[in-house]
Structure formats: C-alpha cells, structure tokens
C-alpha cells in the first residue's frame, strides 16, 4: 500500500511557500454546496492537488479499501477552530471544518505508461447541525470537479503495484449511498481521522513530523494525546493481530460498532473491542441468509475456510460481499492477511 505518492509529495513541498490564495470560507459554511470544487479555494493548483495555506495534507495508518484507488487527503480547520479529542471516535471538529478526499489512480509505478486520473473528490463539511457530505466528479480534462447527486460509474484502467493492467468500473456513490458507511447513530460522521489512525510521522516541507504534533502546532488539538495506535495493516514487520485489527477497524468497524449501521448484528470490529463473541469468535450470524454460505460462525479460530467473515470478504456477489458497497474487486492482500490471522487464533 502506497502511503505517499507524487502528488502528495508535491503538495508537501509547496505547502511552506508563501501563498496569497485563501479558502473561500463563506462558500464552506453556505447552506448550498458549490457547483464546482474550485469554488471553495482549497487548492492553489487544483489538478495537481496543491493545497492552499491553511489546508493540511494528512495520511492514515490504515486506510479504507476502495478498489485500489489512491487517496489524497486534506483537512481544513477555520482560523481559531479547535477539534476536541475523543478516545474512540474521530476528533470533534469545529463548525466550518472540511475533510477533503480525492480518489484517483495515479499510475505512478515505474511500470506504468498510463497518466494519472483523478476520479472524484468527496467533502465532509461540518456545519452547526453536524456533518454534510457532497461529492465532485472530475471532468475528462482533469481541470475541475463538478457536484454530483446521482453518482456515476467510470470505466477505466490502472496499473497495480505488481505492474499488471487492471480494468475497473469505478463507482462514484450517490449522495445517499455515502451514508451506508458514513453514518453513526443515524447521523453522518467521518471515519478515518481518529487519533489512533493519525499517530504517525509524515513529511512536510519543513521536515518530518508526527501529525498529531503538527495539528497541535496549528492550534487545532491539544497536546499529549495518549492513544493506542493502529498500524499500517500491510507492514509485515508489525504484529499480525494488530495489523488485522487495524484493517478491520477502518474497513468494517465504522458499521460494525455499537450505534453503527450494523449494530444489530452484534458483530463489532472496531479496534478497541475486546469481547471475543462480539469480535465474531464462534458467533452465529443474526440473519445472514445465503451470505453465510451455510457456515455456522462469523469466525472459527484456526479455520478461516469455515469463517463467514472471510467468505464474505472474498465474494464479489453484491448480495454477499462485505463491505456491501465501495468495491468491485477483491482485496487480495487483505484476504491473505485475514486468512493468516484467523488461522493463528
């Protein structure tokens, strides 16, 4: 999994340069979402994803899988804004904050002869009533992205890290489908920016720094946050259990958590869950139907092929696969990880 890429490195390098452009904060807090991504002023160079001053790039220890798409993440917190720390949740960002995530196939492996392709940019905007989501689909010329309500299917190709060409029908969700993942206690909520998933060093123009420290220097959060950190699930040098739990947290734990959209299943896969039955150990499904493949338990320790969780991760059948949306491909490397994890339980 690539943690950095050419566009992010450009963004880091230019971020420290004196920039006169400003975020259009009045547009951010407007009741009506902008028609074009460029209207917000988040970037001094939109197509190269170079952020405006006051917009910081960020990265996650483990990221949500979306058909191998690269993700360029940025965060905007208005001047004087402060984000409250929640131990097991995302930061409580102040009104006017924006989480910006561009999905792309950058095709930046040496073996690739394909150009980079920006697909969509999703915004989560914090207003007085909570979070609202809006998506923007990039035009063919890659000069701007335009507000989407209905979503779109983009037929394209990308080169994977092994140098293989992949055909993909990338699906931009409609405005309601976003709620399938970004909903907790019946309200829209971010997924990734929890302290435990941000506690890592990344390279800024003025040097490498822990993201939590950088955010503190910006005045956004308090210092000395104590958290058990997630890890990069693909890092084979990390503990297998922590890798697997990190993957399940970001890919499953936002729904499979008390108060999440999969609350009634009793299967809770967030990083801090420690009850074995709720983690799926010998847990019978509530109502899996054919999605269970006649298997008895969510996880059978020591036997991945008898575990419903792994079966549904491998499936591409819309009525069986997990997650239910956001992918058209099997996440081969993650399936291998979870197979090894279940085998050693």
Image (cartoon, helix red, strand yellow):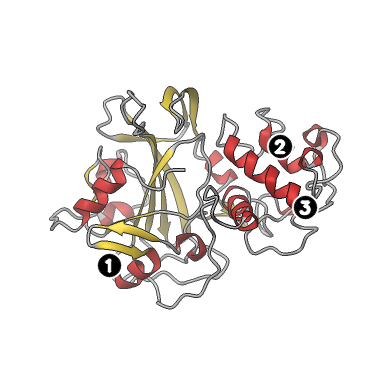
The extreme front residue here reads: 237
Residue 30: where, in percent of width, then height? 33, 53
Q: Give 160 or 20, whichever is nearer the viewer.
A: 160
Residue 308 point in image, percent of width and height: 77, 41
Tell me the number on the disc at residue 57: none
SS under mark 3: loop
Cα distance between the residues tagged 3 and 1: 44 Å
Q: Residue at x 71, y 31 (%)?
A: 319
Q: Which residue is mark 3?
A: 280
Q: Tag 2 or tag 3, which sits nearer the N-term?
A: 3
Q: Residues within 10 Å of mark 3 (few under 14, many from 20)?
A: many
Return the residue at label 1: 79
Residue hosting label 2: 312
Q: Earlier in the sequence, mark 1 or mark 2?
A: 1
Disc nearest the viewer among 3 and 1:
3
Real-space Cα separation, disc 3 to disc 2, in angstroms: 13 Å
Of the numbered discs 3 and 1, the one sitting upstream in the chain is: 1
* Residue beneath the point at 36% across and 33% down: 109
- Relative side of 326 to 341, left or right: left
Residue 134 x, y percent position in the rendering: 42, 44
- Which callout, 1 or 2, points to the residue nearer the camera? 2
Picture coordinates of residue 338, whole percent (x, y): 67, 45
Which quadrant holds residue 5? top left
Left/right of residue 263 with respect to residue 25 in the rendered view: right
């Amino acid at each position: 999994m690539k943690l950095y890429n050419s566009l992010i490195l450009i963004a880091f390098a230019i971020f420290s340069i004196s920039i006169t452009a400003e975020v259009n904060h009045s547009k951010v807090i407007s009741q009506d979402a902008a028609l074009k991504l460029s209207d917000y002023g988040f970037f001094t160079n939109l197509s190269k994803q170079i952020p405006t001053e006051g917009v910081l790039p960020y990265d996650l220890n483990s990221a949500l899988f979306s058909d191998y798409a690269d993700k360029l993440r940025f965060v905007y917190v208005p001047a004087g804004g402060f984000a409250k720390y929640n131990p097991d949740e995302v930061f409580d960002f102040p009104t006017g904050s924006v989480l910006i995530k561009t999905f792309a196939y950058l095709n930046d492996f040496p073996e690739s002869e394909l150009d980079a392709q920006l697909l969509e940019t999703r915004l989560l905007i914090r207003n007085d009533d909570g979070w609202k989501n809006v998506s923007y689909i990039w035009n063919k010329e890659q000069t701007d992205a335009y507000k989407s309500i209905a979503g779109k299917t983009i037929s394209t190709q990308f080169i994977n890290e092994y140098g293989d060409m992949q055909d993909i029908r990338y699906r931009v969700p409609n405005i309601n489908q976003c709620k399938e993942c970004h909903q907790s206690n019946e309200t829209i909520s971010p997924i990734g920016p929890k302290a435990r998933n941000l506690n890592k060093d990344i390279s800024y123009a003025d040097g490498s720094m822990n993201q939590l420290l950088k955010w503190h220097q910006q005045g956004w959060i308090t210092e000395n946050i104590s958290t058990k950190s997630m890890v990069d699930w693909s890092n084979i040098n990390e503990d297998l259990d922590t890798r697997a739990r990190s993957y399940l947290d970001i890919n499953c734990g936002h729904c499979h958590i008390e108060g999440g959209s999969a609350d009634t299943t009793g299967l809770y896969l967030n990083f801090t869950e420690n009850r074995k039955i709720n983690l799926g150990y010998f847990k019978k499904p509530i109502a899996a139907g054919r999605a269970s493949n006649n298997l008895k338990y969510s996880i059978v320790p020591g036997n991945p092929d008898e575990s419903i969780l792994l079966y549904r991760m491998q499936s591409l059948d819309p009525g069986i696969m997990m997650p239910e949306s956001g992918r058209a491909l099997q996440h081969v490397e993650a399936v291998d990880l979870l197979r090894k994890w279940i085998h050693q339980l």
